[in-house]
Amino acid sequence: MAKRASLIFEEFAYHMVAVARSKCKNVDLGIDSQVYLFDSTTIDLCLSVFWWASFRRNKGGLKMHTLYDANSHIPVFMHITAATVHDVNAMDQLNYEQGAFYVFDRGYLDYSRLYRLHNAGAYFVIRAKSNLKFQRMYSRKADKDNGILCDQIGKLIGYYTCRDYPQKIRRVKFYDSESKRTFVFLTNNMEVTAAEVALLYKHRWAIELFFKWIKQHLKIKSFWGTTENAVRIQIFAAITTYCLVAIVGSDLKTDRQPYEILQVLGISLLDKTPINELVTKSDYRNVKERIVKQLSLSLF
């Protein structure tokens, strides 16, 4: 019965994801393509309580692998696994959309899986590792004023790497003046500019903000139940709440972020003010603002 309940919550969460994506306006990312971000976050659990979530010797945990739509800021796919599952294994659960960009951190650098993405007609942008073995075939003009140190087309060398990814690949070296760091990106798209490749990877920070938001504001770091199904129910309930808040913001045509809307609603639970006025006029930073207008509770 509990397992059936978790499946119901999961199905409803994906239904709300579809509704939220259809309502939320797409953000201009500077590129005329759908952009997805893929990453995971680890949720630490007490092993003595969550006995099924073995992670380390004295520590439990699970991973929430998430595919995040950077255009609408809505998570479109969640895969919950044990914390011991390596990130690249979650890539096997993805169905790639033709013509879309998928942005990964270097923890997902698996050339055979990236080649499957390439054969599906999609594009990837991923940060390269320091031990990259790359043979340049030719170079493009680098715009060093915008931080582009080099833009090269070539092939991977090494027996296993060239076998796993036999096609040409593009290498972009970028210097970020803000963080004073140099990044090396790999992509299979030969059409976009090198600056756009760097910009696509920069958008990856949005999924980190989503993980931070959902942990802090939806309280999935502390669970009401101890079974695996109870944990899954609470996670998908949190995703549903996120989508509902995003839908409210879209319907009210407000520029507030979902966490701001949730904060306003949280301090106005007993307020009779219409929700559109609450969202548009309330100062969510001042938690005492609406206390005087709340209904009074009497013990008699």
Image (spheres, helix red, strand yellow):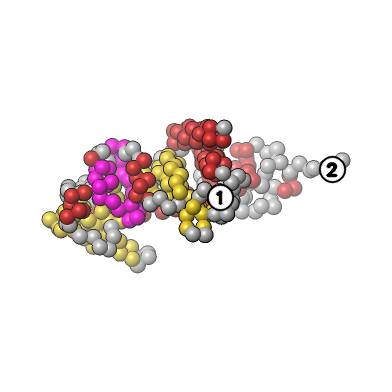
Which tag is nearer the camera, tag 1 or tag 2?
A: 1
Residue 299, numbered circle: 2
Residue at 42% from the left image edge and 45% from the top image edge? 66
**Number of numbered discs overlaid on the protein picture:** 2
> Tag 1, which secondary structure?
loop
User: Which residue carries the number 1 mark?
Assistant: 50
Residue closest to the far bottom: 180
- Viewer-proximal residue, 30 or 13? 13
| Magenta stretch encompasses residue 117 | yes
Query: Which of the 4 image quadrants contains residue 121?
Result: top left
Residue at 68% from the left image edge and 42% from the top image edge? 269
Q: Amino acid at mark 2?
A: Leu
* Residue 255, above or below 129: above
Residue closest to the far right: 300
Residue 158 visible within the image: yes
Quadrant containing the C terminus in the rendered view: top right
Residue 181 in picture, x, y percent from top left: 33, 66
| Magenta stretch encompasses residue 11 | no
Q: Residues within 10 Å of mark 2 (few under 14, many from 20)?
A: few
Quadrant containing the N terminus in the rendered view: top right
Query: Which of the 4 image quadrants contains residue 120?
Result: top left
- Viewer-proximal residue, 147 or 56? 56
Q: Amino acid at mark 1?
A: Phe
Residue at 35% from the left image edge and 47% from the top image edge? 89
Residue 88 in picture, x, y percent from top left: 34, 49
Quick one: label 1 or label 2, which is nearer the N terminus? Answer: 1
Residue at 75% from the left image edge and 48% from the top image edge? 292
- Viewer-proximal residue, 93 or 77? 93
**Which stretch appears magenta?**
97-118
C-alpha gap between disc 1 and disc 2: 39 Å
Residue 283, numbered circle: none
> Tag 2, which secondary structure?
loop
